[in-house]
Image: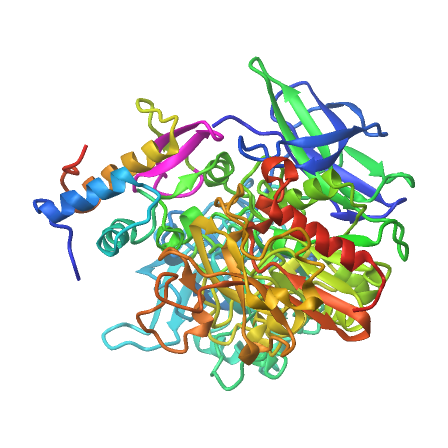
Amino acid sequence: MSERILGYSDRLSAVPGDAVSFKISAPLPGKFKARLVRLICGDDSPEGPGFKSKNIDSEIDGTYPARHQPILAGSYVWVTARQPFDLPNFTVQAMVWPTLPGNGKPQCILGNYDAATGSGYALYINEQGCLAFRAGKNPPVSTGVKMLARHWYEVYAIYDSGTGRVVVGQNMMLAYHGMQQSISETQMLAEPVGEGGRFLIAAWNDDKLATAHFNGKIDSPRVSGRALKPAEIERLRDLPLDVELAQYVVAAWDFSRGMSTVKVTDVSGNRYHGRSINLPTRAMTGWNWDSSDFSWQSKPEQYGAIHFHDDDLYDCGWRTDFTLTVPTDLKSGVYCVHVWQKTPTGKIEDYIPFFVRPARGTATAPLALLIPTASYLAYANQQMVSSWWFDELSSCKFATMSSVDQYLEEHEGFGLSVYDEHSDGSGVCYSSHLRPILNMRPKTDLWQFNADTHLTDWLEKKKIPYDVITDDDLHAEGVDVLRPYRCVMTGTHPEYYSKAMLDALQAYTNGGGRLMYMGANGFYWRIAYHAGLPGVIEHRRAEDGMRAWFSEAGEYFMSFTGEMSGLWVRNGRPPNMLVGNAFAAQGFVNSVPYHRTPESQDPRVSFMFDGIGLDEVIGDFGTVGGGAAGWEIDRADTRLGTPPHALIVAAATDFPDSYHWVNEEMNHTHSAVNGDTNPRVRCDMMFFETPNGGAVFSTGSISYGGSLAHDGYKNNVSRLTENVVKRFVDPTPF
Amino acid sequence: MIKIDPQSAESTALASQFKAAPFGPYSADLQKLLQLLRWGFVRGRTIIICTKPYREWRLGRMAPKRGLPVEVSETEVFTDYGAAVWACFRARWQEVVGQPCPVK
């Protein structure tokens, strides 16, 4: 697999005057070139509209020195004080829940060990999965007993420089018959411990890098400046610290404090605080969680664990190669920085997307295209082909890897999506855009970003003026970012929504705005943005819905905000309330056409069907499955909140067995769950009026956008959509 | 649980049905056979690799874990996706049933 030129920007959405910094890693020696393009269509498939972009002369055009920039994945805590941990006698202890013991790599729990100099100390799990301790150049000391994955242990190492002895031990918190609950190993250390490096939790140093990443939860880590007795270890488990032993404690970190931050708080009184790197997962049940509460805000003392992963990634931290200040006259739209390097046979290239809004508070068109950046992040660098044991059973196809899939499979460290499990099998909760996102690109699969370029392509072809705004803006600025527009158009798959985003869109339609929902499976999952850190979302899969992984019990509430996550319908806000329909089924073998319903003859929607006959089959064509209704589909249901006056104007019902009903509607398993025998597997196109002269149009289909360009854009899907846009940007109230 | 009986005329007929229409529609029995071939993680099993977008596919296999090269066939190249799908079906049949698929 050949190397790639890769990059990312420090922000996704920008207004004129904003500076957007681009960071590039170019694998070939010498130089790379860059230019700015406006992206019209990213679909380069033979049946599609074709890749279309427009060169924009800009300050970033030019040639730059090429350099490789590494990605350093793996989360840990870095304690900023160093000298206080250079101790002649010490005890280190923690509660641990290892998830990958014996993965062939050392996994550090805590210490200041530096592998580059062979100095300092660390309590860790060795390559065979046994608790171990190392100090200086001494041979490691191990219990020799492999730890059980996903079990809580109290672990410790006690070093007395006077006797030269170290005691390494563990107490298993769950007793099993026939297993020794407490074991320890005592050895003499001949060599000095040495100074070590930074004090880290869940990793150790290798000069300036962090390595030996821990997989699993760590709770209640403590460092004492005295060789305690093994019996004294458990007296320091809880907080407040044991009154008698507290005087010896150098640091005691309470991970339940600052849950929504990257700060790690030392409560010993010495204030040797730390910071988490690469966003290990917080708001995790601790060693003492007793299922009496599921909200970490109610019982923080039971949520004192952080779950570390060797593949966590928040910010690549690459150096900036160039910065674009968005020109004041740059039209709002989807843009890419195009970078490339020549090769003997052609070139390697990347297109790095970003989105330009008009100046805040202004609109330069009556229509806004709301780019679903939160959903792009949710899918960023997804590796479902390897993460999902049920992948082929769900898609009903043999797994087919694209070049993006293959590259991500072969190159670890790009971070994962919330569709994946970490290397230790735990669900991925956080996704950041501060890394190259290989599937948020033109010339990739027709899904999310690249599928949404069917909409920009159609709008440009039809010469319909539009502004571009994003989820990031909607979350930060609320309904104010929508109010300047008579009509807002969603992308093909606006799946992930924060409460602020949902409230804003609902306020917009309630206030007379017009919403065109050009997709399906929208407004489905609840997410949170971080109050302080840019560019990252959080999501927990909780306990229902078409979910990629199971949340552990007690871990449904998000660390960023304390809100419950999971489905919006389970949070009391079904999508039907906003857009008339909601996720009903999915299938990926073929798409099908819509047929008009009797309700489509209602005079309220005569504008929609101008030029479309009553018996016309709508959308039996398209590049996404060969039809306009498909992939993921939504259905109306007044029991789930569809407004009583909403009209189902067209419907698709002819779905095959490969379309599977959504599991959240299945309160109980039964046998009629696929498109061939389940009447709830259907796609409903909706229209309804909202207060103050507004209205909503919903296609209920992800495939819909792929039908717009058929036959030179002269087709009934394009006609219907154009009819809606014309009416929706007309200010005459509904 | 049902099993694929490699000697039976029914299994041969189902394989032929798939070969004739690899993208369906599938009979109920063929759906069940495909479920048996597709259960579980695909790591270590034959899958399809798209080696040139829209134009070329080969059979391949992921390595035992992430971070290692994907094994891609050097011998058989498909310029039709349906042909690649049929070849993958036969390879899976061999892996799951333990014998070659009776339909070539």
Q: Position of residue A468 (x, y in %)?
A: 77, 49
Along the viewing direction, whichever of A26 and B15 lies nearer the viewer: B15
> Which residue is painted at 40% across and 34% down in the image?
B49
| Magenta stretch contains residue B56 | yes
Q: Position of residue A193 (x, y in %)?
A: 53, 51
Q: Quadrant of the C terminus of chain A?
A: bottom right
Along the viewing direction, whichever of A424 and A462 lies nearer the viewer: A462
| Magenta stretch contains residue A103 | no
> Which residue is painted at 49% across and 44% down in the image?
A626
Along the viewing direction, whichever of A79 and A281 lies nearer the viewer: A281
- Looking at the image, is A388 positioned above or below residue A271? above
A270 vs A365, left or right, is left
Q: Which residues are magenta?
A: B45-67
Q: Position of residue A83 (x, y in %)?
A: 68, 56
- Looking at the image, is A451 positioned above or below residue A232? above
Q: Which quadrant of the figure has residue B43? A: top left
Q: Position of residue A611 (x, y in %)?
A: 66, 51
- Looking at the image, is A149 positioned above or below residue A182? above
> Which residue is painted at 30% across and 70% down in the image?
A671
